[in-house]
Amino acid sequence: MLEAKVYIVGAGPGDPELITVKGQNILKQADVILFTDSLVNEQLMEVAKSDAQVLKSAGMNLEELVDCMVTNVKQGRSVARVHTGDPSVYGAILEQMRYLKRANVDYEIIPGVSSVFAAAAAAQIELTVPELTQTVILTRAEGRTPMPEREQLKDLASHHSSTCLFLSATLIKKVVREFLEAGWLETDPVVVVYRASWPDQKVVKTTLGQLDETMRSEGIRKQAMVIISKAANEQLLMEEGKYESKLYDKSFTHGYRIGESVNG
């Protein structure tokens, strides 16, 4: 039986099988489930117990949402607050936690599979390739929500790391311009994944120079992860002997294996 508190659960990117076992167990036991129905797969709610109250939160404002959670917990009920992906990345949970703390209501965060990793899996790419790119930047283009002064997209792009853009599908012209200004080439590879892990998932591989036109022709203007990375260059990565991890190199010694001598 769950404690009477709020469980902020990461539902994963869409596929109902991509929720964690812990997250699913909470959905099975919770007295009240509040889920972001605009993004979370409603199939996940099928495991709720028969007497659970299942509520959609897309039409609620912050005060209504938090009041619902606080009232139920103070009446002795467990509440599952279900967010898409992982709550810690663009989850808008800070303001909810702030209200819950003020109301002396306990909460626990259950991590989930982020859409960025579901997108990389769908595109069959590794975001961190030895000697090519070892850093992943998770960010967004500046729109109605301003970016901090030191996190302008052009400045982040100047690192030439794998860059994964959330919430940026409507700002692609701006994205392309800033990456080109940061020294990227029009021929550099880009992968766009629309609705990663959902039945209507779409994976589009293109280049930075063709990105805006490609997304327009594919009709992708929302719910898309844009990955700009040298690691998305299939032709380059399929060259045998290049950009390989030392982990499985037979000459490499580590804690579980003695490497073979190069001279036999």
Image (cartoon, rainbow, N blue to C red):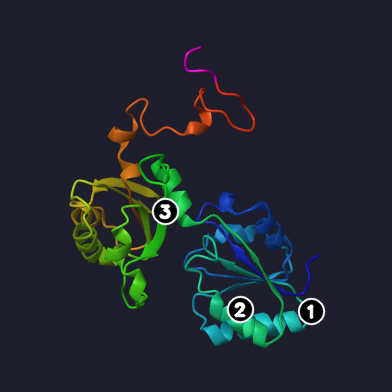
Which of the two residues, 156 or 115, is positioned nearer the viewer here? 156
Q: Which of marks 1 and 2 is nearer the N terminus?
A: 1
Q: Quadrant of residue 174?
A: bottom left
User: Which stretch is magenta?
Assistant: 260-264
Asked if disc 3 and disc 2 are in contact, CB closer than 8 Å, the reply is no
Q: Which of marks 1 and 2 is in front?
A: 2
- Please determine whether, in this image, residue 92 is positioned above or below residue 99: above
> Badge 3, how many Cα within 10 Å: few under 14, some, many 20+?
some
Q: Name the residue under label 2.
A: 97
Which element is circle 1 on?
A: loop
Q: In which quarter of the image is residue 72?
A: bottom right
Magenta segment main secondary structure: loop
CA gap, disc 3 and disc 2: 27 Å
Three-letter amino acid code at the position of disc 2: Met
Give how far across and how far down residue 130 sits, in percent. 41, 39
- Please determine whether, in this image, residue 135 is positioned above or below residue 131: below
Asked if disc 3 and disc 1 are in contact, CB closer than 8 Å, the reply is no
Which element is circle 2 on?
A: helix
Which of the two residues, 138 or 206, is positioned nearer the viewer here? 138
Three-letter amino acid code at the position of disc 1: Gly
CA gap, disc 3 and disc 1: 42 Å
* Location of the N terminus (image quadrant): bottom right
- Please determine whether, in this image, residue 96 is positioned above or below residue 152: below
Three-letter amino acid code at the position of disc 3: Val
Q: Name the residue under label 1.
A: 76
> In percent of the image, x 52 and y 63: which residue is there?
84
> In percent of the image, x 66 and y 87: which residue is there?
102
The answer to whether any part of residue 198 appears in the image is no
- Please determine whether, in this image, residue 156 is positioned above or below residue 95: above
Q: Mark 3 points at which residue?
A: 136
> In percent of the image, x 74 and y 63: which residue is there?
29
Q: In this view, does 100 lie to the left or right of 200?
A: right
